[in-house]
Image (cartoon, rainbow, N blue to C red):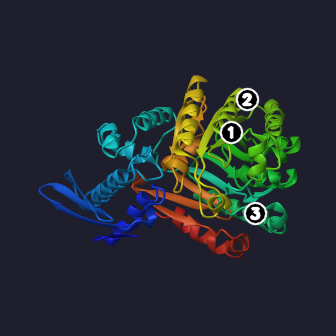
């Protein structure tokens, strides 16, 4: 149990507690004050008290509140690290976007490295953050009126063991598909006045290729009036067991420029264990089937899948590189409550997972890839991160925009969260749609009106 004399800090402090396995069961108390130009944080874990003083000045009330939060989390991290003997790769940083903090420092005319060191971030991740910022330089922008379009197709062949998304096997949800496609057509038709300068389109899931070719073509046809020439256009094709030439033909006909082939692993044993109904050879066949179309390709791998050894993960990285996709994203297994693996697996030994992450960085760098986006999630194994790697000149615009929140994001379909930026991104307002497909369909007209009010607001 954790208590603080500033109850508003408890959710933020709990994010730190969850980084340390078993720490949620500890009796922890926290208090904070400001004296002599220092933030003073006292943390008691059981009977042990630690006191931390951090000297800092602030510009205004908002900055003061952010510093209160920063140094409270740092004090708790250091106390838990001392109590457990565990140091974590991102130290006291708990936010989804480490690069956000780095950009704030750079935009203020300061190097970000000193702050990251103060927050106990590992030197390798400080270097990684700098590499990601360099990898974004040709894509990163903060222009008013820019917009990305996301279309949600939350349908899958089967539900993977690690998945916490709302997707369900297509056999259980196909009855909703005709009404869902009609709803997307209505949403897309209503979206034209809401889009300024369109930077990218992303049709994601789920597994969009689980739709039949003619169903997928309906979605692509509805997007067509909104898309401008030269706009990046991605379809998350997904799993290779649903690839067909007809679906690739439809993508090519409607101007899709990039597809995602989500391998996750090249170990047949791992794929079977996580509920995939395909083999590593099927992944390679999907690459071969897509090759003549000239799409750029994103490929996903996951480090830390249950039961997978370092050797098996290493082989997956090697085989993914051999296929030469433009992007390879290395995810760390995220044990969320909605995923069956959350309850059914123990965490990997940290040394094993760290070896996987380190190998992927070395191998991808040696193969000529550069990191260009990263993000973190709660409940990630080993408190690691997800990193997208690209061949130079092939960064996915949508991934950068979404991770850095530099553009409006118009998101359509069930479980879609739109984001509208105001004052150059200083304020972001969100609009979410229901996760449940029948509820989404029932509220469609209201959702369209609400989204329009947000995006047309000044």
Who is closer to the viewer here, 217 or 301?
301
* Residue plotted at (32% across, 55% down): 79
Which image quadrant is residue 183 in? bottom right
Locate the C terminus and report the quarter of the image it occupies. Answer: bottom left
- Residue 158: image quadrant is bottom right
Which residue is at a point 19% across and 52% down the rendered structure image? 57
The residue at the far left in this view is 36
Give SS at disc 3: strand
Say left or right for 240 vs 140: right
Secondary structure, mark 1, is strand
Q: Residues within 10 Å of mark 3 (few under 14, many from 20)?
A: some
Q: Which residue matches tag 3?
A: 168
Considering only order in the chain, which callout, 2 or 3, is on the residue closer to the N terminus? 3
Q: Earlier in the sequence, mark 1 or mark 2?
A: 1
Of the two numbered discs 3 and 1 on the same chain, state the one appearing first in sequence: 3
Q: Residue 323's mark?
A: 2
| Badge 2 density bin: few <14, some 14–19, many ≥20, Cα 10 Å | some
Q: Disc 3 to disc 1, how far (Cα)?
A: 22 Å
Marks 1 and 2 close (CB-CB < 8 Å): yes
Residue 174 image point, x, y percent: 83, 64
- Could you tell me residue 161's position as x and y percent? 71, 56
Residue 299's tag is: 1
Pick the front one: 53 or 151: 53
Q: Where does residue 239 sit, x and y in percent of width and height?
A: 77, 46
């Amino acid at each position: 149990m954790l208590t603080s004399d500033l109850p508003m800090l408890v959710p933020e402090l709990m994010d730190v507690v969850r980084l340390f396995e078993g720490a949620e069961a500890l009796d922890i108390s926290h208090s904070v004050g400001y004296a002599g130009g220092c933030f003073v944080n006292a943390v008691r874990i059981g009977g042990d008290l630690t006191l931390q003083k951090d000297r800092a000045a602030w510009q205004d009330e908002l900055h003061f509140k952010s510093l209160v939060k920063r140094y409270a989390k740092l004090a708790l991290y250091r106390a838990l690290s001392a109590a457990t003997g565990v140091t974590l790769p991102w130290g006291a940083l708990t936010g989804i976007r480490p690069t956000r903090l780095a950009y704030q420092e750079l935009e203020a005319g300061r190097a970000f490295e000193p702050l990251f060191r103060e927050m106990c971030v590992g030197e390798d991740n400080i270097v990684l953050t700098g590499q990601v910022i360099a990898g974004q330089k040709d894509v990163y922008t903060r222009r008013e009126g820019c917009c990305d379009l996301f279309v949600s197709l939350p349908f899958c062949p089967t539900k993977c063991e690690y998945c916490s998304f709302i997707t369900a096997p297509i056999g259980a949800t196909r009855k909703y598909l005709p009404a869902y496609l009609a709803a997307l057509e209505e949403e897309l038709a209503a979206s034209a006045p809401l889009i300024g300068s369109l930077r990218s389109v992303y049709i994601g899931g789920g597994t969009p290729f689980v739709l039949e070719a003619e169903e997928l073509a309906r979605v692509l046809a509805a997007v067509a009036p909104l898309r401008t020439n030269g706009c990046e256009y991605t379809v998350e094709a997904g799993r290779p067991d649903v690839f067909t030439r007809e679906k690739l033909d439809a993508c090519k006909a409607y101007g899709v420029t990039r597809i995602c082939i989500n391998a996750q692993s090249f170990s047949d044993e791992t794929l079977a264990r996580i509920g995939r109904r395909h083999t590593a050879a099927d992944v390679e066949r999907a690459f071969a089937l897509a090759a003549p179309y000239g799409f750029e390709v994103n490929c996903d791998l996951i480090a830390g899948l249950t039961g997978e050894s370092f050797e098996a993960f290493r082989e997956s990285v090697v085989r993914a590189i051999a296929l030469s996709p433009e992007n390879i994203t290395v995810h760390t297994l995220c044990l969320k409550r909605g995923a069956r693996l959350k309850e059914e697996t123990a965490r990997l030994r940290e040394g094993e997972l760290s070896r996987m992450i380190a190998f992927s960085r070395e191998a991808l760098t040696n193969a000529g890839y550069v990191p260009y986006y990263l993000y973190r999630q709660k409940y990630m194994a080993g408190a690691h991160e997800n990193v997208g790697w690209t061949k130079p000149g092939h960064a996915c615009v949508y991934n950068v925009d979404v991770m850095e929140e530099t553009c409006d994001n118009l998101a359509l379909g069930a479980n879609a969260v739109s984001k509208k930026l105001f004052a150059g991104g200083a304020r972001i307002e969100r609009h979410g749609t229901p996760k449940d497909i029948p509820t989404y369909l029932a509220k469609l007209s209201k959702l369209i009106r609400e989204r329009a009010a947000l995006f047309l607001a000044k």
